[in-house]
Amino acid sequence: MRESAYKVLARQLQISNKRAKELIDRGLVYVGNRKVQIARGLVDTKTKFRVKEVAKPKVLFEDEYIVAIDKPPHRTSEEIARQFGHKLLHRLDKETSGVLLLVKDEDFRRRAIEEFRGGRVYKEYLAWVEGIVPEAFTIDYPILTIKRGGRAKSRLSRSKGKPAKTHVEPLEVHGKKSKVKATIETGRTHQIRVHLARSGHPILGDTLYGGKPWDRLMLHAKRIRLLDYDISAPEPRDFAMG
């Protein structure tokens, strides 16, 4: 017999259907090494699932103006903000890990937003991508983002997109995969993901933009420089391929 994955998981773990669906939607549920992508997808009722544990967010730095969090994958930025009781200064995708800034002071928030708008914030990311990246390159291609039903997807568009520039530098090669450093001069939705896919090197786990399935989206917000702050997050364990 076959039944929706979330219902089979709910019975297996003795949890509610709602909770089971949430675990699948977070990208935490696997059959063997394959991630379950669709909660309502049909599976054999005897399927045995594996549920990945979510790491806890850690405070990297805190003062009277900001709290810098080392955000784990599989947690939304909004969840982190609610947990710590402060406003988001920016956002990271659910499966992206790394530096996330929360703000305590409203005057500081306004100053910081102007820095973002003025392109004066340094943002550095690490990513594991498909293929071998032999040398540094820059992608300068406008991005158009379309939001529907609470979800966003971006695409390249010279006629309708907003300016977007990403600098990519190779750091390491492992088999047919490369670890790269990406710095962005703009902050469009899914910018690094879309630009790397365009270059022929989609991020591992980024199935939305043509990447191969992986445990998670292999993108990490390594460092951010804003006003007088310079904050880095340690490289996550799952970034060690060797």
Image (cartoon, rainbow, N blue to C red):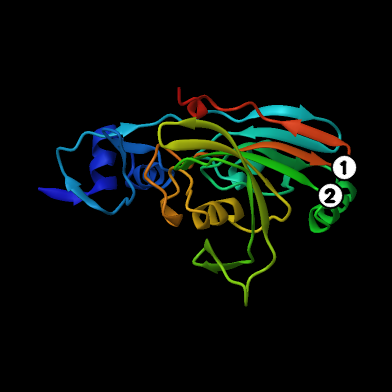
Q: Are marks 2 and 1 in contact (CB under 8 Å)?
A: yes
Residue 39 visible from this viewpoint: yes
Label 2 to label 1: alpha-carbon separation: 7 Å
Q: Nearer the viewer, residue 137 or 212?
A: 137
- Kind of residue at badge 1: Leu
Q: Residue at x 61, y 58 (%)?
A: 189
Residue 90, horizontal then vertical, whole percent: 70, 49
> In screen coordinates, is 217 left or right of 97?
left
Residue 99, horizontal then vertical, whole percent: 67, 36
Number of other residues with Cα within 10 Å of mark 1, as a class: few under 14, some 14 to 19, many 20 or more: few
Relative vertical location of residue 14 with respect to residue 114 in this rendering, above or below = above
Q: Residue at x 70, y 65 (%)?
A: 163
- Kind of residue at badge 2: Ala
Mark 1: which secondary structure?
Answer: loop
Residue 124, horizontal then vertical, whole percent: 69, 40
> In screen coordinates, is 239 left or right of 137?
left
Relative vertical location of residue 237 with respect to residue 11 in this rendering, above or below = above
Where, quadrant-wise, is the C terminus in this rendering?
A: top left
Mark 2: which secondary structure?
Answer: helix
Residue 207, horizontal then vertical, whole percent: 41, 51
> In screen coordinates, is 63 left or right of 193?
right
**Which residue carries the number 1 mark?**
227
Number of other residues with Cα within 10 Å of mark 2, as a class: few under 14, some 14 to 19, many 20 or more: some
Q: Nearer the viewer, residue 176 or 30?
A: 176
Q: Which residue is situated farthest in the top direction here? A: 242
Residue 86 visible from this viewpoint: no
The disc label shown at residue 112, or none? 2
